[in-house]
Amino acid sequence: ETGVTQSPTHLIKTRGQQVTLRCSSQSGHNTVSWYQQALGQGPQFIFQYYREEENGRGNFPPRFSGLQFPNYSSELNVNALELDDSALYLCASSLVGGDGYTFGSGTRLTVV
Amino acid sequence: AQSVTQPDIHITVSEGASLELRCNYSYGATPYLFWYVQSPGQGLQLLLKYFSGDTLVQGIKGFEAEFKRSQSSFNLRKPSVHWSDAAEYFCAVGPNAGNNRKLIWGLGTSLAVNP
């Protein structure tokens, strides 16, 4: 049983640029959620995808978008990066009706 | 409103001492409850979870937690802390039905362990 894999592990971008973060879900999981964790804070829910459609969203602007692919892997895209977007981005996969969440190790994004 | 409160931002204990980290939640129905641990610069590791049944749950690394419905609490305990337990601890709640998988998190408790 594989876990959740996120790439890249670290990333530095310039304000105004766009970034794509990737997540490979745990085998057998059909839902992926993305969280933003600012330094010293708890994770904040960005959105989740189920059956390749967004079916839940937190308080994040539209410049945060995502995709889920048929193999349940996922991307998080952030446009027009702002300094406050600097954070650890965590991906979690789970199974609807299941009882667990598996987190990846995260992508550390720094916006300068 | 749905929320998770971890009242203690920072706790310091001596190695070998007992530990209790507090977690209170506000949620529309009885949620699933979780405790995660995070070492500096790392992702989240699940310590334990509660879904139903026995309100005292056992987790990894010698941790346990007790769900108290009347107090809306899910406190984490360990009888004897090891230096390697120094980390950030997060309490989280999530729905126990439907296809909404959103977790709501506390702000975390930072644990320091004195030798």
Image (spheres, coloured by chain):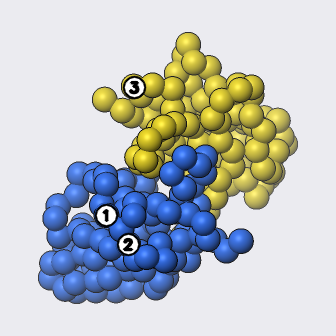
Chain colours: A blue, B yellow
Bin the neighbour count of mark 2 within 10 Å (Cα to Cα): few under 14, some 14-19, many 20 and up.
many
**Residue B72 placed where, x, y %?**
52, 21
Q: Quadrant of the N terminus of chain B?
A: top left
Q: Are marks 2 and 1 in contact (CB under 8 Å)?
A: yes
Q: Which residue is at the front of the view, B15 or A92?
A: A92
Nearest to the eye among marks 2 and 3: give it: 2
- Name the residue carrying label 1: A53
Q: Are marks 2 and 3 in contact (CB under 8 Å)?
A: no
Asked if B103 appears above or below A73 in the picture, the reply is above
- Name the residue carrying label 3: B28
Q: Which residue is at the front of the view, A84 or A98?
A: A98
Q: Chain of mark 1?
A: A
Q: Earlier in the sequence, mark 2 or mark 1?
A: 1
Bin the neighbour count of mark 3 within 10 Å (Cα to Cα): few under 14, some 14-19, many 20 and up.
few
Disc tally is: 3
Q: Which residue is at the front of the view, A4 or B38?
A: A4
Q: Could you tell whether B24 is left or right of A49 in the image?
A: right
